[in-house]
Image (cartoon, rainbow, N blue to C red):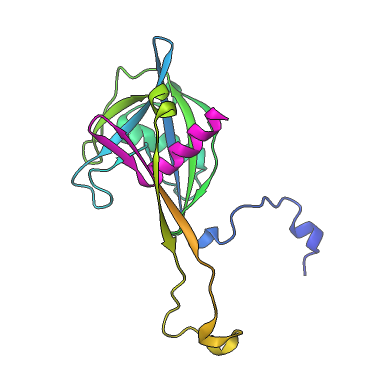
Amino acid sequence: MTDIKDKFKNYKPYINGYKNMKRAAVLIPLVKKDNSYSILFELRSKTMKRQPGEISFPGGIIENNESPKEACLRETFEEIGIKEEDIDIISPLDVYVSHANLIIHPYLGLIKNTDNLNLNESEVDHVFLVPLNYLLDYNVTCYTNDVKVIPKDDFPYNKIPNKENYKFAQGDYPVWFYEYKNYVIWGITARILENFLDFIKS
């Protein structure tokens, strides 16, 4: 058996259970004009199978042998046509783990040039800008949902204390809502946005 010290020599801790979860990366794209910042958002195509017509950041699934940053840059190019050399990655942001077995790696990046956007119309209906100051000043609303463990029919209650009366811990799932003109930013996009804005405010 390999010595335990040798086994952990180059070990890099990550998220417990990640091998059974989907992994994605997204970009919060900052655009600077006239000394003020805006964030670029996508409106997803209404023909998409998942979340049609919703607002999102550029991004998508991390492929095999691809780093989160590489996936972020690739997906941004594939969706809105911005090349890697036109993106200045400022920093990775807090990793988000959803209740639906999804790990998302967000990145903050400055878009150097928005003159040559090339939208993938099968995925993106259009893009729009929201001033950063507007979002920082916005009185965001949050609604909290319950997350419960619902054991399946074959769960072995006989192996745990209190059997069928065991009290599984219950969690909260907050959902933020931002509104700008006719757009509603909510869900995971709003959660990642809220995390970024909260850091800026602090």
In the displayed structure, would residue 11 be above or below residue 140? below
Quadrant in the picture for residue 25: top left
Quadrant in the picture for residue 125: top left
In the displayed structure, would residue 109 be above or below residue 175? above
In the displayed structure, would residue 61 be above or below residue 165? above
Tell me if residue 187 is in the magenta stretch. yes
Seen in the image, is 184 located left or right of residue 34?
Answer: left
Farthest-out residue, bottom? 158
| Residue 171 percent across, percent down from the top left | 50, 61
Q: Nearer the viewer, residue 202 or 191?
A: 202
Seen in the image, is 60 located left or right of residue 64?
Answer: left
- Residue located 48% across and 83% down the image: 155
- Residue located 42% across and 15% down the image: 36
Q: Quadrant of the N terminus?
A: bottom right
In the rendered structure, which segment of residues is drawn in magenta?
176-202
- Residue 156 appears in the picture as rendered: no
